[in-house]
Image (tube, rainbow, N blue to C red):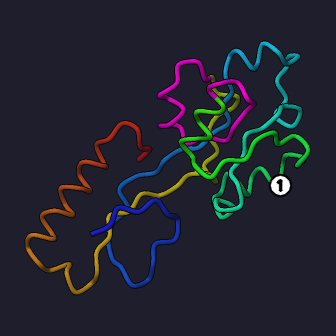
Amino acid sequence: VAVRGTNHPPDNLVGRLAGRIRTGPFAARSYLRTRPAPHVLEALDWVAPDDSLAHLEQAKWLRRHIDPARIVLRMDSLVGMAEAVARGHGAGMLLCPLAARHPELVPLAEPDDALDTQIWVLSHPDLRQVARVRAFTRFLHDALRDDPALAH
């Protein structure tokens, strides 16, 4: 059984969509105090995913919208990105549940549906009729479906 954050689950697994993780632009209040208002996204410094995370939708968004010269820090971890943004290194396109852990972060815009990451509960097709696997995947799906950190 796998719980995967992906918008393209593998063809060799079967399962159900349990929810979505929203992604949006955030910055620390301390960082924003150093920047002239209004806070235009393209004019801010950015903490970005590094090449190992280039496949993520937020990395693609940054490549389309932000001048590479505005990227001040690249991270190989989404948790690390949230920490760096919370410490005032720049704005970041962050997973909303990670940003919510940092009260000093403020959203710069509403989350963009195109950046959502689907959460899937998956298993091998040969296992889907095994009672204990069905019970476990149902439990996981229900728990994730009821998680307020996920969009449904």
Was residue 99 drawn as part of the magenta stretch in this picture? yes
In percent of width and height, residue 45 lies at 82, 34
Q: Quadrant of residue 64?
A: bottom right
Q: Which quadrant is home to the N terminus?
A: bottom left
Q: Nearer the viewer, residue 32 or 148?
A: 32
Question: Type of residue at label 1?
Answer: Arg
Q: Quadrant of residue 114?
A: bottom right
What residue appears at the point 88 percent right and 16 percent down from the top-left corner? 36
In percent of width and height, residue 78 lies at 57, 46
Q: Quadrant of residue 99?
A: top right
What residue appears at the point 32 percent right and 41 percent down from the top-left corner? 147
Determine which residue is flagged by label 1: 64
Which portion, as a residue range, is magenta? Answer: 86-105
- Left or right, 23 with respect to 39, comes to left
In percent of width and height, residue 65 lies at 84, 48
In percent of width and height, residue 61 lies at 74, 52
Residue furthest to the left: 131
| 58 is higher (above) or lower (below) than 106 | below
What residue appears at the point 42 percent right and 57 percent down from the top-left corner? 119
Was residue 87 drawn as part of the magenta stretch in this picture? yes
Q: Secondary structure at mark 1?
A: helix
Q: Nearer the viewer, residue 8 or 103?
A: 103
What residue appears at the point 52 percent right and 24 percent down from the top-left corner? 102
What is the number of callouts on the image? 1
- Left or right, 134 with respect to 76, comes to left
